[in-house]
Image: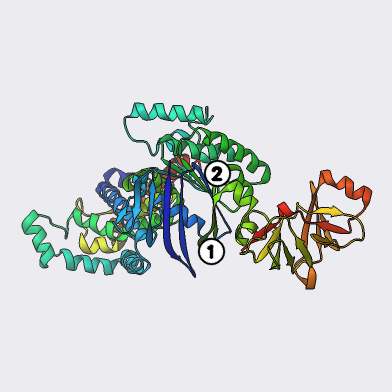
Amino acid sequence: MDEVMRILQDLDWSPLFISLKTGIVATVISFFLGIFAARKVVKASPGKKAVIDGILTLPMVLPPTVAGFFLLLLFSRRRPLGEFLFSEFGFKVVQTWLGCVIAATVIAFPLMYRNARAAMEQIDVNLIYAGRTLGMSEVKIFWKIVVPTAGPGIASGTILTFARALGEYGATSMLAGNIPGKTGTISQKIAMVIQDGDYLTAGIWVAIVILIALVIIILMNVISGRKMKHIRRW
Amino acid sequence: MSVRVEISRQLGDFRLDIRFSSESRRIGILGASGCGKSMTLKSIAGIELPDDGHIEIDGRVLFDRKSKVNLRPQKRNVGYLFQNYALFPTMTVGQNIAAGLKGKRAEKEKRVREMIRKFSLQGLEKHLPGQLSGGQQQRLALARIMAYEPDMILLDEPFSALDMYLKDRLQREMSEMLQDYPGIVILVSHNRDEVYRFCEDLAVIDRGRIAVFGKTKEIFANPVSREAARLTGCKNFSRLQRIDSHRGAALDWGVDLHVEGEIPEYAKWIGYRAHDFVPLWGKKAGENRLRAEIVEQAELPFERNYYIRGRKDNEAICWFVQRENMALLETRGMPDYLGLEEEKMLFLK
């Protein structure tokens, strides 16, 4: 026990903050992109739908290292896009926190998109027709009718997205690396200390991750549960 | 007030081809399920796009294929009452009413309060649609439409999913609410009582085409087309052989017909409503009477249904007797013949 306290006292908390920051930013980006993509796909013709859906879902089914490979191809400064971003805007992706965010977003995005899409497809199309005949603009119909009615699905998509982004490892380690204090996330920290055989420190971080995940999921369930009063209990 | 509708569109294996114009404020569209009446309504609202046609209200063109006019539903100013009301489930009663309103917040709030009062939804402003009863939901759906003052309101089978008790109450409420509405109302239904109750003008649709269009009361009295007769509730049909303008034969019933007036030349069929037969006793056969050989009967709360053998194993002929007329049958026994009265005969194309 004394040893645990000693480790906690000297603990470098930076992985916690890096992971949380990455998770939150990736979730916010995925939230809007996912809803936007879901809207486009729901409205698309069946043929287009199949193709676009396939591409958008791919990062979820592929090993994260494959996504990491493609991300490196895109953003490496030895490649045209990476070179362009750096020389024109000064953006560095590889081995930076930006890389953490991009990797987490790419991996977690499909969860948001698929949940939002499934929820939107469940909506009674008459609600949308009613909105139109009542003179509501398409934008207003989307944000005032579609999104709130699809609320429970979107909420669960957000939770899953955050959980996935928080724990992202494979693509992150390839694109952003594990630079302590910069790109060193909790998952990378755990992997690193395990390699040194330091199970105690790893265990502490594992406990922290479980705690965060549990708190956030319960919190969001409570919030969405309060807003979703119109959904009947079984 | 006037409306002109011409719609043409391929619908599965038949072509929807509807044209009518009316000066009346209450118009009914009567047709069996899948005849295209809902598609007609959706085309007027702009939710569905017809292949060809022209739609105008009071000279305002909503759709015209030739001049490529096709107003968005948002610009048509046509209210649509969906069968399931399509209330927004996450919005309160007040927000539902305000959903389509434009303008300043204070004006909107005033309008919402006005509608809440008019449709007696007081005290429910903060409720969600899921917490309302069926009647309150209908009032809210109408309040939401009326709030933005449409030129026309379309009612898409508003009562067909309700039980009988609720149906009658909501029909009365609906008539009351629509009473002082100055615009045009089009009611689509497969129920003859509903259209009879609500509509001055009536269009009967059969497989995508208008079978008859005219004054509702006149169509019920003289439907002219067989589909119209069926939809207005006529149960009995027989092929008609016209001998001359006063005489003919109902072939499927084995009845000789003799009328003072004229049997129109177009008449290929005769229809006779199940409630209109007159019981006759005595052995004498004759014109305008049908042998009452009862093969089956059914007891209902307020009437008794008898089924009479037609000729050559054709469909049974229905005779419905209301409860107040039952006493006569009980004292005199079952009749030998059923008489057909001339003014009740429907001569059909």
| Mark 1 closeness class: few <14, some 14–19, many ≥20 residues within 10 Å | many
Residue B73 placement, left or right of B297: left
Of residue A36 and residue A212, the one placed in the foreground of this image is A36
Q: Earlier in the sequence, mark 1 or mark 2?
A: 2
Judge left or right: residue A65 versus residue B297: left
Which residue bears the numbered disc 1? B207
Amino acid bearing label 2: Glu
In the displayed structure, A182 sits above or below A177; it is: above
Which of the 4 image quadrants contains residue B96? top left
Per the model, the C-alpha gap separating discs 1 and 2 is 23 Å
B260 relative to A96 in the view: left or right: right
Q: Which residue is mark 2?
A: B200
Q: Secondary structure at mark 1?
A: loop
Mark seen at residue A10: none
Number of the front mark, 1 or 2? 2
User: Residue B225 lies in what quarter of the image?
Assistant: bottom right
In the displayed structure, does residue B287 sit left or right of residue B130? Answer: right
Tell me the amino acid under the disc marked 1. Arg
